[in-house]
Amino acid sequence: MFLADGAVPRFVFFTGKGGVGKTSLACATAVALTDLGRRVLLVSTDPASNVSQVFGVTIGHHITPINSVCGLDALEIDPQAAAEEYRQRIIAPVRGLLPEAEIASIVEQLSGSCTTEIAAFDEFTELLADPAATQAYDHVIFDTAPTGHTLRLLSLPGDWTKFLDDGKGDASCLGPLSGLQKHHHTYAAAVAALTDHERTALVLVARPQEGAVAEAARTASELADIGIDATHLVINAVLPDADASDPLAAALRAREQAAIGALPVVLRSLETVHVPLKPINMVGVPALRAMFDEQMDAADGATEPDLLASWPTLVGLIDELAGLDHGLVMCVGKGGVGKTSVATAMASALAERGKDVHLTTTDPAGRFDDADLPSTLKVSRIDPVQAVAEYRDRVMAAKGATLDEAGRAVLAEDLMSPCTEEVAVFERFADQVAQSDHRIVVMDTAPTGHTVLLMDAAGSYHREMTRHLADGQRLITPLVRLQNPDITRIIIVTLPETTPVLEAEQLAADLARADIHPWAWVVNQSLAAAHPASGVLALRAATEPSLIRRVANKADRLAVIPMTPS
């Protein structure tokens, strides 16, 4: 176990860029602690949690025993379930006392993404701040959402505490906020727990790759800015000494060691542990127990290779998209599957073919390497901080123009609510989607859970706008564009591993409920397509073809991208 001395604090958070192995490490740590006789609660704050898949048990929104591990319970905080419970808590006391029309109005106020955020946040803070909520456990392990979403979650206790301390006016999200004030002391207690190293360890997780290490450094800095200091760094899935006869393995090993050797200053002071790459996927209790076993070698995971003879490539999808003059191409999927690289490759190729292309991202942690992009390619990102600042300025200039000084002060306080970010970011998203009417917009999205919530916001906006239309009127909302396959082409990006494929299938099901369907699937970073010659890589490659076939059976279009050392 990475905390080898056994001095594990009561709360342990695993956070980092998507796809670096937070869930595997959190689950393996929880199992290791129960093996020491501890009682452990494992909590996922990721809207796209895959803890259920790792243990092969349906967990969901209520504490569930993991029967295969004595002493371990788990909880997946479901934002939608939390929001429904939150709505019912607020509505129940007035149901039967108020007219149905007024009840319906309250329900409408409580149906936005702000309510979803507050409800999930309430669940999170109760676990941190209320001793009674976790008194049955020695440890609470948090498997968090990818970085941008987690930074938002960890900053919320301070954001809401400050808002409730300072705010004296009505809020635009008054319905959702109606239950907040009575929990003010809970949020203050959550802040205290997050900043107390004797009670809380915050573990940054990274792969031995330049981008993942840079993301961990950014996370450490941004957490420090809100008064939360990281305590540990785990570099996960480090390739063992490479077989010199395998050029791919040797190149990957060299790249990894260079990234490890160039750790940013902000990470060097953290207690650091390297976890070797395993020849098996981290699914099931035996695999989790082997995660911290440094003696496990390639022979422990040996299987016969089953390599496919040919692979459809990304070029085929680009060729088809090159026939368009406008439209939206959205790359969606779990964090860490390579959505940014796929979106960048497609946008660059289309721009080089003379197309008018705009490459953008909805990921709060999204970054593009502008130096490697064609000069004709327009590039942007939705920066939540900038979006909020511009939104506040615009609202103050418009609504505030007719208010007196006291009214403007109330409006300014209202706009300091953390709910404002949800509205501002959605507006930017809608603007980018609308651009697809006259150019090709290639959109790199935030990891799955964040993107699903954005889609939910599109649905809420659509329902609100169309509710006021007269008969026969039609409004082109972002949801209408997303549902139209002639306008929007959804590309689900995944990896040839069990958990990412299961999560991609769940994402497809979630989108289908909103009548949004994938145009294509991309299986990224395939070792089988790269044909490694020996060692751990070859064994991992042998597990991929059956998963790729599973994806192919669901996909109208498929592309497989080989693993490369670059």
Image (spheres, grey):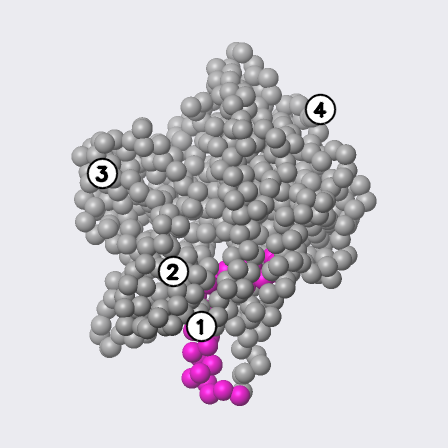
Q: Is residue 54 magenta?
A: no
Q: Quadrant of the N terminus?
A: top right
- Asked if residue 507 lies left or right of residue 404, the reply is right
Residue 322, which numbered label?
A: 3
The residue that mark 2 highlights is: 423
Q: Amino acid at mark 3?
A: Ala
Seen from this angle, which residue lies furthest right? 37
- The alpha-carbon separation of the residues under discs 2 and 3 comes to 34 Å
- Which type of secondary structure does the marked residue at label 4 adopt? loop
- Which mark sits nearer the N-terminus, 1 or 2? 1
Q: Do the residues under discs 1 and 4 have CB atoms within 8 angstroms?
A: no
Seen from this angle, which residue lies furthest top? 245
Mark toward the viewer: 1 or 3: 1
Q: Is residue 117 magenta?
A: yes
Mark toward the viewer: 2 or 3: 2
**Residue 353 against residue 75 in the figure, above or below:** above
Q: Is residue 518 visible?
A: no
Q: Amino acid at mark 2?
A: Val
Q: Closer to the camera, 162 or 173? A: 162
Q: Closer to the camera, 558 or 90? A: 90
Q: Residues within 10 Å of mark 4 (few under 14, many from 20)?
A: few
Mark toward the viewer: 1 or 4: 1
Residues in magenta, as a range? 97-125
The residue that mark 1 highlights is: 170
